[in-house]
């Protein structure tokens, strides 16, 4: 059987107890992805709106993140301690939920602006002068 059950009350309580950790991890991922997309976009000479769209497309962290988190949660040392505890696992779930919503929403908003900018650039390039 695939999948797992989450106790919503425990999940929310765990996030509230570890709010700073959750915000820090999510912010680090969002900012890190932004820096990477911005840097790569500048290297390749992409306009700012394309860099933002690249960033939004790289935000979602789901499949590999889930697999790594579940393996880490199931891994125990010789004395029976988990590699990550349930509270950190819940923070990872919050990260996945946040980025799987934020990425597509940003992409939906940024893509039309990117296409408009590209059209304006093509029109300007076609103008003599």
Image (tube, rainbow, N blue to C red):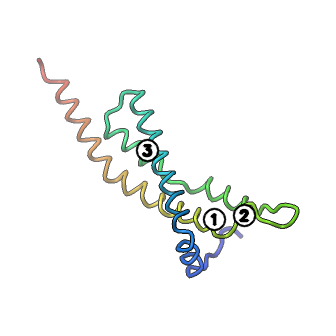
Image x and y of residue 74, in percent: 76, 64
Residue that appears at 81% across and 62% down: 76
Earlier along the polypeptide chain: callout 2 or callout 3? 3
Earlier along the polypeptide chain: callout 1 or callout 2? 2
Determine which quarter of the picture holds residue 118: top left
Q: Residues within 10 Å of mark 1 (few under 14, many from 20)?
A: some
Q: Which residue has dot 1 on it?
A: 88
User: Compared to 69, does 31 lie above or below?
Assistant: above
Mark 2 touches mark 3? (CB < 8 Å): no
Is 72 on the left-hand or right-hand side of 47? right
Is 70 on the left-hand or right-hand side of 104? right
Distance between the alpha carbons at the discs numbered 1 and 2: 9 Å
Image x and y of residue 37, in percent: 44, 39
Mark 1 touches mark 2? (CB < 8 Å): no
Earlier along the polypeptide chain: callout 1 or callout 3? 3
Distance between the alpha carbons at the discs numbered 1 and 3: 24 Å
Q: Which residue has dot 3 on it?
A: 34
The label number, if any, that marks residue 73 in the structure image: 2
User: Compared to 10, does 20 lie above or below?
Assistant: above
User: Compared to 11, does 73 lie above or below?
Assistant: above
The label number, if any, that marks residue 27 in the structure image: none
Determine which quarter of the picture holds residue 78: bottom right
Distance between the alpha carbons at the discs numbered 2 and 3: 28 Å
Q: Residues within 10 Å of mark 3 (few under 14, many from 20)?
A: many
Is 38 on the left-hand or right-hand side of 61? left
Q: Secondary structure at mark 1?
A: helix
Image x and y of residue 1, in percent: 71, 70
Q: Secondary structure at mark 3?
A: helix
Image x and y of residue 117, in percent: 24, 38
């Amino acid at each position: 059987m695939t999948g797992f059950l989450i106790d919503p009350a425990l999940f929310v309580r765990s996030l509230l107890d570890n709010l700073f950790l959750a915000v820090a991890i999510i912010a680090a991922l969002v900012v890190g992805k932004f820096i990477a997309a911005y840097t790569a976009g500048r290297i390749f000479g992409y306009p700012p709106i394309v860099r933002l769209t690249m960033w939004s497309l790289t935000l979602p962290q789901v499949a590999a993140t889930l697999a790594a988190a579940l393996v880490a949660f199931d891994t125990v040392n010789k004395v029976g301690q988990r590699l990550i505890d349930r509270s950190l696992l819940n923070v990872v779930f919050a990260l996945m939920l946040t980025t799987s919503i934020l990425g597509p929403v940003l992409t939906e908003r940024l893509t039309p602006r990117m296409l408009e900018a590209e059209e304006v650039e093509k029109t300007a390039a076609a103008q003599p002068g």
